[in-house]
Amino acid sequence: MAPRAGDERADEPAASPHAAALSRVTRRYALLAGLLEFAIWLPLPVLVLHMTDRGLTLSDIGLAFALRAVLVVLLEVPTGGLADAVGRKAVALVSQVCTLLSFAFLLIVTGPATLIAYAVFQGVGAALHSGALDAWYVDRLKAIDRDVVLPGRLAAVQVAQAAAMLAGATIGGVLPSLASDWALPWPLAGFGVALLAGLAMRVVVLWLTVVMVDEPAFAGRLRLSEALTAPAIVFDGLRLARRLTGMPYLLLATGAMGLSLIAVETFWQPIASLTFGADPATSGVYGLLGFVLGAAGLLGSLVVMRYGDRVPGGPVVLAGASHLLKAGAMLVLALVVGGGGVAVGLALAYFAIATQNIGHDTLLHEVVPDERRSIMLSINSLVFFLGIAVGSAVLGPLATRTDPRIALAVASAVTLVAAFAYLGVARAGTRAAPAVEPTPGA
């Protein structure tokens, strides 16, 4: 029987002999990606509170986040090439070990030395992680069926990650209050128990990656020496970015996305603590707020999956409207006093982050020619982390000297101005320009 209109799998042959194998790989990867997201989000609802509880200032935290972002910027391109040269699984495992070590240092953080160790291992791990397992997943699908339809399968993984984010943020926020009567020793006392839970889950994910990621003997598409020629690759990508219609505007929006994300992640907990306090025994409210932001992110993903292609004006309107909504949400979070303002600001911000990501990424793929997609995605990632680095380095010290609400309000103003980048995209259009010849040696 022919697929019905609206059938979620109408875009894939119903009688495909490979359907069962494709579904098995998708379920395996959705489980792995979901558990990794769960491990990431377990400590996040109290991460900044944990650091301030250990005597660190918002300036210290901002500079550490800036160092982490700068390391990602420096390592993003060569480590991406490394995955293409030696294999996705090997790079993913090294990434997970580095990230596990980073949170071990954060669990015992007592001052600048351990904070810097956290930032260094976190930066290296994040750079290595970028795209490695995603590339393995797509490679495995295409090894089964070269004509596999990707959007629906990628969406299934995204929904699994969003659901894991919701669960992790909720549980991680509640854990310190549940453990407050257990008289746990240092470094598990206070908010440290949430970091320990995240570490334990990362060990599980590391083991599952060893067991579940089956990568045959990897014949790298790049020689290792070619993979590490980062400067030539970056200059080639920047040269191409100037010629692609609308790409400079998209990169401007990308930098603002990085700045706004790190501003929300860094300051929402200190702002919430002005209303709810920062006592681990009453951290349940941070679990509730974690549920709110996780549910908003999941709702945003589901709404765009269902209605995103019906937005008048297409992805440029979706991304631009989401960017404006995020700027407004940050202002609400900064200026509206009380728990209601925190909850509403967080919900709107994470809903907008989810919807903007999908619209922005769609525009990016429309602009970039197929044969140069990898390098342009790396350039986009570089600019995103540059936004994080600038935001962390400037806003953290500003929050220490003044108030986290003032720092977030400044970030909101920058985000609002950057929304005009999407007007530039709309005026320029999104026609992919012909690829340029790579720089010699790239």
Image (cartoon, rainbow, N blue to C red):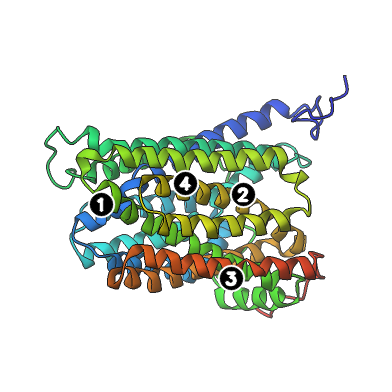
**Could you tell me the amino acid type at mark 1?**
His
When asked about the image quadrant of residue 371, the answer is: bottom right
Q: Secondary structure at mark 1?
A: helix
Q: Is residue 41 left or right of residue 149?
A: left
Q: Nearer the viewer, mark 3 or mark 4?
A: 4
Q: Secondary structure at mark 3?
A: helix
Q: Which mark is residue 50?
A: 1
Side of 177 where 339 appears, left or right: right
The Cα atoms of the two marked residues, 2 and 1, are separated by 30 Å
Residue 73, image x, y percentages: 49, 69
Mark carried by residue 355: 2
Residue furthest to the right in view is 2
Q: Tell me the element at label 2.
A: helix
Foreground label between 3 and 2: 3
Q: Amino acid at mark 4?
A: Val
Q: Which mark is residue 344?
A: 4
Between disc 1 and disc 3, the foreground one is 3
Residue that mark 3 sits on: 417
Res 388 visible: no
Residue 245 position (above or below residue 11): below
Q: Dots 3 and 2: beta carbons under 8 Å?
A: no
Question: N-terminal of the two: label 1 or label 3?
Answer: 1
Q: Kindly report the distance in space between the C-alpha atoms of the residues bearing marks 4 and 1.
A: 24 Å
Report the number of discs.
4
Mark 3 vs mark 4, CA separation in Å: 22 Å
Image point (87%, 19%), residue name: 1
> Disc 2, disc 4: CB below 8 Å?
no
Of the two numbered discs 3 and 4 on the same chain, state the one appearing first in sequence: 4
